[in-house]
Image: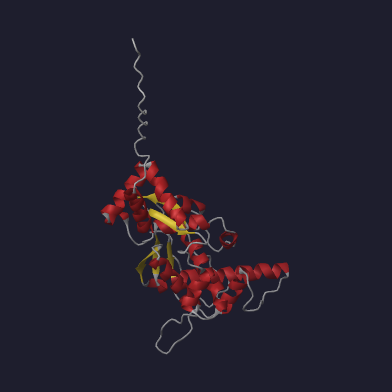
Amino acid sequence: MTEHVDRSEPEPAAAPAGSAVTPADAADAARLVAFGLQPKLQPARDQEYTELLRRYRDDPAFARLADAVAAGLGLVVLEVSPRAGMAVTAAEDSVFAVRMGDYARRTTADSGDRFLHGLAHLAAAALAFPRPEDLADDSYIGRVTVNGVDAFVRQACRRLEERAEELGENTDPATDAPGLEAAWRIWARRSATGATKDARRPAASTTGIVAKALAFLTDSGFLQRTGEDSGGTYRTTARYQLQVRDLAGSAALAELLELGVVPVTDGTASLLPAEDTEDLDLVADAGLPFHS
């Protein structure tokens, strides 16, 4: 009796479900990243966005694919959730990165002002989330005003001047001197409001610089404008909280908060009144509400 030998090729093992990436999967992942690049778009108002976020949460393979698409575009994924959507930030070498020099040139031809624009953004972040627990609490909403940010920087200038005098350091650097401390001193010499024939706020004034910074953050989906008081009032978004968390380790932000200009005790916060405000060039209604 002859033994039958089956010489046919063995059938390949079935691929695990979900292991194969299809062009449709790649398109959906790219679509999710595209939604993330629209910071003003709220997931709750777009059904497709909501579905892609759910898929990211429930399908690890799809989540890895979306993360890879973002990484290929030079984007860092901060969080993916119904609260923040797909929150991404651009790495320094990303085509989506907005550099402070480019941002400042949109506002002024004076290259020396880029330090002041950077300081306005730094101060807004410090005031929006003055405590570590504010950054950790997803339900926390910070509030800033144009006049409040300007007042905060001017009081920081006073603290820095006092510290420099105690240490016997030069307190009058050249206007174009690099460095954040030099920027604070330049800010103190700049007019808060300036004057124009039609009563508009000059872009080169410090409140003009702050207004530009907060408007940029609003256009970027990080702030929402809530009123006109105090030069313009704004509330933070989940995306801004994530961005500031990413910034929180910077030495500049830590130094700004350590100046003690913003005291926090029982859950409320306010600008610390200066001993002598006559030479601080503060605008009217420079107070800053932090909580509703």
x, y (%) of residue 100? Answer: 52, 69
Q: Is residue 227 left or right of residue 191?
A: left
Point out the image quarter for the N terminus.
top left
Residue 157 visible (yes or no): yes
Most foreground residue, 237 or 185: 237
Residue 278 visible (yes or no): no
x, y (%) of residue 52? Answer: 32, 50
In the image, farthest residue toward the bottom:
197
Most foreground residue, 110 or 161: 110
Q: Give the quadrant of residue 179.
A: bottom right
Where 135 sits versus 108, above or below? Answer: above
Residue depicted at x 40% and y 48%? 65
Tell me how many marks there are.
0
Where 49 sits versus 119, above or below? Answer: above
Most foreground residue, 16 or 183: 16
Q: Is residue 255 left or right of residue 80?
A: right
Residue depicted at x 31% and y 50%? 24
x, y (%) of residue 91? Answer: 50, 59
Where 56 sits versus 188, above or below? Answer: above
Q: Is residue 256 left or right of residue 88?
A: right
Q: Give the quadrant of residue 279.
A: bottom right
In the image, farthest residue toward the right:
168
Most foreground residue, 219 or 31: 31
x, y (%) of residue 227? Answer: 35, 69
In the image, farthest residue toward the top:
1
- The colour scheme applied to this rendered structure is secondary structure
Q: Give the quadrant of residue 250.
A: bottom right
Point out the image quarter for the C terminus.
bottom left
